[in-house]
């Protein structure tokens, strides 16, 4: 098992910001991004563990979390419309920071045959950056099976995989 925690103070952290501008494109209004910088602090941790249950069966799990905040004062953000410009309060959080997430898997390995089931999950995203939209938490199930064949002195791996078995609609923040 491995576990790590961290705290990082980043001066002039560079990130994309729409700054309230939107352009009309083929698919409708899309934000125009520009890169800007602010001081920020990132605090988080990640963990990974695996356990061999029997000679053929094992379990493994991972989890990670990051909490990010701007530490410098931020100006109001202008929002431009065709007829007016108004200002909104800036977010305390940098954009594109994932919510707590992880996976858990059960694996089978017997000689050249293998199979597994994995659940990937994430909590809902609530610490949002400027103009980000909240995303709901999710859990998805992935399955796989494989075999290794020795043909003509060469090892071949054949794997079948089904991701998102139940066709769950989700957004990976």
Image (cartoon, helix red, strand yellow):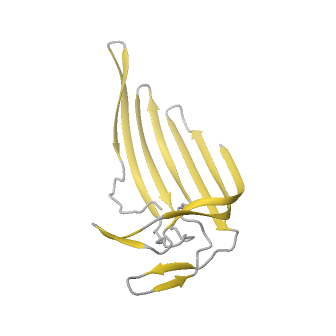
Q: Nearer the viewer, residue 82 or 93?
A: 82
Q: Nearer the viewer, residue 156 or 144?
A: 156
When asked about the image quadrant of residue 166, the answer is bottom left
Quadrant for the N terminus, please.
top right
Q: Nearer the viewer, residue 170 or 103?
A: 170
Q: Nearer the viewer, residue 84 or 109?
A: 84
Single out the residue that lies furthest toward the top.
Answer: 153
Residue at position x 48%, y 70% in the image = 132
Residue 148 picture location, percent across and down: 38, 25
As drawn, is 14 to the left or to the right of 106?
right
When asked about the image quadrant of residue 14, the answer is bottom right
- The answer to whether 126 is drawn above or below residue 56 in the figure is below
As drawn, is 29 to the left or to the right of 108?
left
- The answer to whether 108 is drawn above or below residue 104 in the figure is above
When asked about the image quadrant of residue 82, the answer is bottom left
Residue at position x 48%, y 80% in the image = 79
Residue at position x 68%, y 48% in the image = 3
Residue 19 picture location, percent across and down: 51, 72
Single out the residue that lies furthest toward the left.
Answer: 26
- The answer to whether 72 is drawn above or below residue 117 in the figure is below
Residue 10 picture location, percent across and down: 69, 58
As drawn, is 154 to the left or to the right of 66?
left
Residue 49 picture location, percent across and down: 61, 44
């Amino acid at each position: 098992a491995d576990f790590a925690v961290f705290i990082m103070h980043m001066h002039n952290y560079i990130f994309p910001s729409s700054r309230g501008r939107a352009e009309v494109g083929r698919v409708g209004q899309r934000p125009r991004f520009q890169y800007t910088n602010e001081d920020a602090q990132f605090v988080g941790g990640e963990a990974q563990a695996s356990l061999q249950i029997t000679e053929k069966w094992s379990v493994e799990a991972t989890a990670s979390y990051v909490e990010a905040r701007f530490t410098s004062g931020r100006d109001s953000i202008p929002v431009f419309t065709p007829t007016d410009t108004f200002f909104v309060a800036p977010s305390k959080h940098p954009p594109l920071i994932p919510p707590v997430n992880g996976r858990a898997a059960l694996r089978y390995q017997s000689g050249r045959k293998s199979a597994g089931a994995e659940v990937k999950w994430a909590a809902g995203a609530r610490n949002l950056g400027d103009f980000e939209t909240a995303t709901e938490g999710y859990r998805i199930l992935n399955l796989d099976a494989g075999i290794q064949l020795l043909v003509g002195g060469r090892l071949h791996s054949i794997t079948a995989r089904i991701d998102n078995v139940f066709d769950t609609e989700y957004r990976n923040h």
